[in-house]
Amino acid sequence: MKPLFRYLAAGSLMLCAQLSIAQVKMPAPSPGQTIHQDFALSFVEVNYSRPAMKGRTIMGDLVPYGKVWRTGANSATTITFGEDITFGGTAVKAGKYGLLTIPGQSEWTVILSKSLDVTSPAAYKPENDVVRVKVAPIELPYAIENFMITFDNVQSNAANLMLLWEKTLITIPLTADVDSKVITQLDAAMKGEKKPYFQAASYYFETNRDLKKALTWVDEAIKENPTAFWIATLKARIQAKSGDKKGAKATAEKAIELAKTAKNDDYVVINQKLIASL
């Protein structure tokens, strides 16, 4: 084989070897995760990576105290709010922010930053802070192997953002102004041609508003859909909350008949329990 051909052949073999190596897919040591939580009238979304303990000491060692932490691994951790909220008691506009922390033995600082690419203390710029929240860590009775960000106690207008790793738990309360927005929408919708009677009655019932108005609306909803067992169930609940036990029992019995016809055992049980509670 001539020298030129030998070189070309050797080069081809090396290129093939490199290409075969490049095609090998390896599992990420700190796998990424996206947490999308429906919240209030929109959502909260967190993008982060999940490093593991792997027998190491985490807090105060791998994650040093007193220094800015990316709150994860690999890329910067970000959090997106679909609407204006309060973050740890501070108002925050809808948008995407960097989620940073400064861990401490007795106190953590949780930071929302305009910077979306902070992966080291050197890259952190305090002037880009939007919010700083002080949080006391809670010691867990068991260890969390992989760093975790999650949500708990999710309600219509409130939720807890939770950071967990090793035996440390950090909780930041989130709240949103849902009530005024919903009432504004209901008021506008009630002026339209197609009125949301069931939704309006449900919201007034759940938020302890004018139950007489809620009862009027649920009756209108029943007129539009007389076989809807879920609407009859709502009426029974409104009557029960209003103190009309006799009316609530009669309506619940009607709801049971409708639910049986629709073969919905869940609502049969719901109404049976409602009658028992009276």
Image (tube, rainbow, N blue to C red):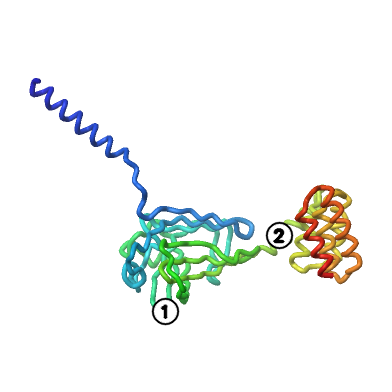
The N terminus - image quarter: top left
- Given residues 161 and 91, the one toward you in this image is 161
Outermost residue, top direction?
A: 1
Q: Residues within 10 Å of mark 1 (few under 14, many from 20)?
A: few
The amino acid at mark 1 is Ser
Say the numbered circle drawn on residue 182.
2
- Secondary structure beneath label 2: helix
* Left or right side of 191 for 161: left
Say which residue appears at 42% left-offset and 71% top-offset: 167
Residue that mark 1 sits on: 106
Query: Which callout, 1 or 2, points at the residue further toward the start of the chain?
Result: 1
Residue 95 visible somewhere in the drawing: no
Q: Quadrant of residue 174?
A: bottom right
**Residue 102 location in percent, x, y?**
39, 70
- Given residues 257 and 217, the one toward you in this image is 257
**Residue 162 location in percent, x, y?**
50, 66
**Residue 106 location in percent, x, y?**
41, 79
Residue 74 visible somewhere in the drawing: yes
Q: Nearer the viewer, mark 1 or mark 2?
A: 1
The amino acid at mark 2 is Val
Say which residue appears at 45% left-offset and 66% top-offset: 164
The C terminus - image quarter: bottom right
Q: CA distance from mark 1 to mark 2?
A: 40 Å
Say which residue appears at 32% left-offset and 40% top-offset: 24
Say the numbered circle drawn on residue 50.
none
**Residue 64 location in percent, x, y?**
33, 70
Q: Quadrant of residue 74?
A: bottom left
Q: Residues within 10 Å of mark 2 (few under 14, many from 20)?
A: some
